[in-house]
Image (spheres, rainbow, N blue to C red):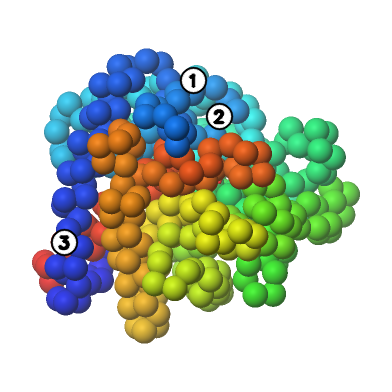
Amino acid sequence: MIACFGKEQVKSFDVEKQLNYCNKQLHKTLVAIQKKDCMPRNIPDSLTTWQLVSVEIGEWTVGFWPGILWYNYENTLYKQDADIATYYTDLLKPLTTLPAYDHDLGFQLFCSYSNAYRLTGKEAYKQILLNAADTLATLFNPTVGTILSWPREVTNRNWPHNTIIDNLINLEMLYWAAKNGGDKKLYDIATQHAEISMAHHFREDGGCYHVTLFDTIDGHFIKGMTHQGYADSSLWARGQAWAIYGYTMVYRETQDKKFLRFAEKVTDLYLSRLPENEFVPFWDFDAPDIPNEPRDASAAAIVASALLELSCLEDNKQKAEEYKTAATNMLMELSSDKYQSRETKPSFLQHSTGHWPDKSEIDAAIIYADYYYIEALIGYKKMLTASVDN
Ligand code: GLY
């Protein structure tokens, strides 16, 4: 990691304090869920305990809890923290040999097993990731040039070849596999998906559609629409967060400047639409009842993590500074008493919105907000350490 913080920034945010807070909250969750064969998913606003989900193919969030436990182990380095991360990672084993149900295989297996492999070097984890990447690639349609995100919606909703913006995140598993002994074609699949998405998933201003539909016969783009946002052409906060994170990662993997320029474009739109002097967005930037709409802390956590990395990858010093400052402000706001759950719930964060049109997970604590929050804190700590060392 390159030195990314100047001396004046080194003291601006107490990252150790926030990581200790995460460790404390996470152990509250462990006591509450008592090694049940389930993963925490959300805590609705009206409740104080996690709603659990069993490890099953359709549940896209099951990899986040093991991922959180690995990040926590990365910080504490206590053997018992690695043991508990191993226990929950192993619960995902049934998913590792199934055919691809949808693109979420990446969220499920990469957030968990890639951290497990990175921190333990266990060969078995590597093999699981290589297999999972091959499985995910079976959803790639070469006529369109993207992965089919939701096979079930081909008939359920008559969405011929559908690709959702979240799918960008799962390209990382393909890039990882191509670099770690897997088929080199996985790199090309990921890059082609990123290119086609860049061409069709975005409006002129850089705002993304949640869902894009393509024709399966000749691959032409049919239309862009929403599923979890307010309207087809509105700026759904988490969708844009996935785009920022996705193109930052694609640039890191390809070193192709067109992806860096695009990551800047999608980021600059997001930053320009944030409420003045606030860093956690409303769930959709175009929701009709702002400022009375619920927020989405998960979007802020995803963007904070992405912008820390983007600031290090930047070739433009001014932009690097701007993104680093924005990410730090996001982390500071997320770490305030407004967004941290503290004594009220065992999650790290509250005030995320999962699926507003479905009236589900509104103003809730949601596991992926916690995952990207601790990922960003770990990233921040590494950048700080690199700055102090240099
Ligand atoms: N991947 C689904 C979501 O962002 O809610």
Q: CA distance from mark 3 to mark 1?
A: 38 Å
> Marks 1 and 2: in contact by CB < 8 Å?
yes
> Which residue is pictured at 26% across the width and 41% down the height?
342
Query: Is 306 placed above or below 5 here?
Result: above
Q: Residues within 10 Å of mark 3 (few under 14, many from 20)?
A: some
Q: Does residue 30 appear in this view?
A: yes
Local SS, label 3: helix
Q: Is tag 3's residue or tag 1's residue first in the polypeptide sequence?
A: 1
Return the mark for residue 54: 1
**Separation of marks 2 and 1 at Cα, in angstroms:** 8 Å
| Closer to us: 194 or 339 | 339
Q: Amino acid at mark 1?
A: Ser
- The answer to whether one can see residue 113 in this image is no
Judge whether 269 appears above or below 377 on screen.
below
Residue 55 vs residue 181, the one in the foreground: 55
Q: Residue at x 33, y 52 (%)?
A: 338
Residue 195 x/y as whole percent:
64, 63
The amino acid type of the residue labelled 3 equals: Thr
User: Which image quarter is the C terminus in?
Assistant: bottom left
Determine contact: label 3, label 2, CB under 8 Å: no
Q: Is 22 situated left or right of 172 in this image?
A: left
The amino acid type of the residue labelled 2 equals: Glu
Label 3, on which residue?
385
Residue at 28 percent of width and 51 percent of height: 337
Q: CA separation, marks 3 and 2?
A: 36 Å
Horizontal relation, residue 239 to residue 9: left or right? right
The residue shown at (30%, 28%) is 29
Under tag 1, what secondary structure? Answer: strand
Foreground of the two, 333 or 150: 333
Q: Residues within 10 Å of mark 1 (few under 14, many from 20)?
A: some
Residue under pointer 2:
59
- Splitting the image into 4 quarters, where does residue 74 fall? top left
